Each structure stands twice: as structure tokens, then as C-alpha cells.
Amino acid sequence: MTIRTRFAPSPTGYLHIGGARTALFSWLHARQHGGHFVLRIEDTDIERSTQESVNAILEGMAWLGLDYDEGPFSQMARMDRYREVIQQLLDEDKAYYCYCSRERLDELRIKQMAAKKKPRYDGFCEQRHGGAPEGVAPVIRFRNPKHGKVIVEDMIRGKVVFDNTELDDLIIARSDGTPTYNLCVVIDDHDMGVSHVIRGDDHLNNTPRQINILSAMGAQPPVYAHVPMILGEDGKRLSKRHGAVSVMQYKEEGFLPEALLNYLVRLGWSHGDQELFSLDEMVRLFDVEAVNNAAAAFNPEKLLWLNQQYIKSLPPEHIARYLLEHLGKLGIDPAIQGPAVSDIVVALRERASTLVEMAASSVYFYRDFDEYEEKAARKNLRPVSVTPLLAIRQALAELNDWSAPALHQVVADVAEALALKMGKIAQPLRVAISGRAATPGIDVTLELIGREAVLRRIDRALDYIRQRSEDGE
């Protein structure tokens, strides 16, 4: 049997963390077994579904690298097929028209709740005789079995048993004729040959209903795996304040897709004490049956730590591709001027947790800064620094080999000639050329900034010192 999984989001918003984890688990299960991963857009909620949301979902999937083998399929394009099955169920007396008004259903619900009963449809129209009430557009209800049990052999939760007496006759077509979620998803999974449905456990209560509909169609149900929800660190349902934002928001904040995937796969699943997983390792090691059946807690600090590990370990050229976008937002085009982006990655990767942070820290490599860090300038750009700065400027201006080793030697030689410790040269120079007290090694910083900018900035620092001295500061 070919393993076929699917991811079926509703296009009513962005691709969020929970949806991305479900997509990842489904993708991994298919890839591990040499199967197929299907993308389906469940867009029958006409009022809330938008093309913008579809685009956002596709963009998120592409950024994460979760490629699909078939799709994206739109439910709205399959209306004829849904109507065909609805008519089949009506013809076989497995569904019926319901003319109950909203008022009657509301009254029924109030009475049931007052009697401490589970609110459910009472089957009033199931055996209805006579003509249809004038001017009433009926819904269509599925005739759920009245006896027996539905047993779900869940890959994560084990055996889950539902009593059919607890299930009412759900609506499968609205009064305007549009089919409902529980019918569409059943038909789609059957028609698309889905063998394994991996989805959030908020759908678990829908599963017995869907199995009964499949049975009425004469079809075998897929294997189900219901993934527990993700909670915030406070134990409450994940929301925006916990970090439950669009997957693409993490891209905007400078996270790498590899880090986010690694974080998501560890939300509820583990392989010993291993923390870092390449995508190939995820495919090889992931086991949906080993997913914990308890809710997972979202930890932003852990995600940040993982991102930093990937920034440190992935090839600089790979990280540079993502860093380019963040540099562009700062008005920097490395193709026009400045060092290669991969060299910036090597210089800053030990100091940055996100690409946004790395981009912000790299601006002085590409263009002159407007101001010095006040504390750094007061400490390092003083009259006592004029002689060392003049000496290092002259030595740098005469240097032919503008490479980190040669630059390091120049700084060391000037320090020795002036009988100063290395830091007494390097730190004023660092502030002069970067505007800040902390940068990568002074030799690397000099190399990346380049001769012309270094000399210009030293001159500016000397003017700054003279001006402060004249002002009596």
C-alpha cells in the first residue's frame, strides 16, 4: 500500500505554528515511507475564505520547504462531486431533509441543557411525512446509526471508542445547498486515496461521524493520528501573546526555516536526548506513533536557541541567502558595495541569535554610521587616543596586503612601537571605524570595512576628538 497523507488547511488566515506542525508530521510520514503528500485547500467557508490566505499558506509551505506531490486542490472546485454523494445518500435513505427552524433548535438546546443533557438534534424530521413546509429551505442531515460503537485505532492515542447513541444526525448540506466540512473532508480523503490522516486533536470528535459517513458510502476509513494541541508556557491554549503568529512572521523576525522545522518536530516528539535534527534525520527517525499524547508547550527561548545553533552551523552561503532580504530592508545592497554577505555571516554568526540581529549588527560594514555609542566614545575617543590613531592610520594607508593576518600584524606593530598594550590601539580604532565598543576581531573588522572607509572613519574620529576637546568636554 502506498502511504498517502494530506494537509488540509482552511484559507481563513495565515499558516500558524499548529498548522505547520501538522503539515510537517504529515510530510515526514509520507517521505519516510516513500509515499505521497497531498495539499488540499478546504475553502467551502465562503464568507471567511480568501485568496490572500491561500497565498499565505502556500508561501509558508514553500519557505519551510514542505513540498507537496499533488495539489493544491480546492474544495470549491469539487461541488458537483459533493452533490453527487449527497444525492446518493438521500436515494439510499442514509440522509434526509430537515425543516426545523432555528427557533425550534434553539428551544430544544435550551431544554436539553436545563435537563443537564448533551445538546443534540432529536431526529424530529427523520420520519417526517407529508409535504414540505411552504417557504422553508431545508438542510440535509446524515442518518447516523442508532446503535453500536465506532472504534478509532488512533496512532497516537490508541483505541478510542465512541457510542453512536452520543452522536446526532449532523447536517451535511446547508439550506443554500452547500456541503458542510464533515462531508467534504470524508469525500476528499476517499477520492484522493488518503491512507493516513494526521491532524490536530480538535478534530477527534469529528472522526466517528466521518467514519460513519465513509461506511455509508461503502468506503474504508483511513488510519487516524490526532496530534495534541500546543499550549503556551502558562498552560493555556496557544495565542498570539505566546508567539502563535504566522509562520512567515518568524521569517520576518530572522528565523531560519531549518530551525523552525527542528523546533516543530520536537513539539511532542523526541529521539533520545537529541536536540538538533537535519531534515534527512527527521525523515529517517520520525515516528508518528511515538508522538506524545499530551499537549506540548511552546517555548520561545528554546526556538531562539535552536535558531542560533543553525546560524552557527549551516554553511555561510546558505545563511547569506536569507540574510540578503534583511539587509535589503535596511537599504543595503551588497551587490553594489561592501563585503560578501557570506563573509559577514562568518564574522557575526557567533554573536547573533536571529538574522534581523545579524543584519542590524552589520550595517557599519556597508555604510558610514551617524553616531558613536556614547559610552564607547567617551571612553575611547579622547585626546590620549589621537597619537595611536594617527600612527595606525599612517600604517594602514601604507599597507599593500589588506587581509586579516596582515592587518592584525600592523596593529600589533603599532602597539609595540608606541609601547602600548594591543587593546590601547585596537579599542579606540574599533570605536572609530564601527561606532561601537563590540565588533568581531579588529583584524576581521578592518578587512570587511575596507581601506577607503577605514581611513575616512579614522579621520572623522580624529575630528570628533578635536571638536570635543575644543568644546571642553
Image: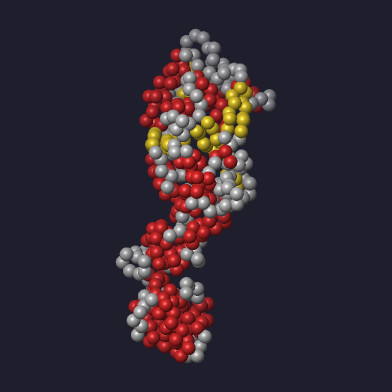
Q: Residue 450: x percent and y percent?
A: 36, 75
Q: Residue furthest left?
A: 336
Quarter where residue 47 is shown: top left
Residue nearest the observer in this picture, 215 or 166: 215
Q: Residue furthest right?
A: 115
Q: Residue 234: x percent and y percent?
A: 63, 49
Q: Residue 393: x percent and y percent?
A: 39, 85
Residue nearest the observer in this picture, 96 or 366: 366
Confirm whether residue 464 shows in the render.
Answer: no
What coloring was used for the rendering? secondary structure
Residue for point 50% across, 24% down = 220
Please count the marks in the image: 0
Q: Residue 62: x percent and y percent?
A: 40, 47
Residue nearest the observer in this picture, 253 or 415: 415
Relative to 296, is 73 above or below? above
Confirm whether residue 447 shows in the render.
Answer: yes
Left or right of 104? Residue 131 is left
Residue for point 52% across, 37% down = 199
Residue for point 63% across, 46% down = 235
Residue nearest the observer in this picture, 399 or 469: 399
Relative to 283, is 202 above or below? above
Relative to 158, is 400 above or below? below
Relative to 306, is 16 above or below? above
Residue for point 54% across, 41% down = 287
Quarter where residue 461 is shown: bottom left
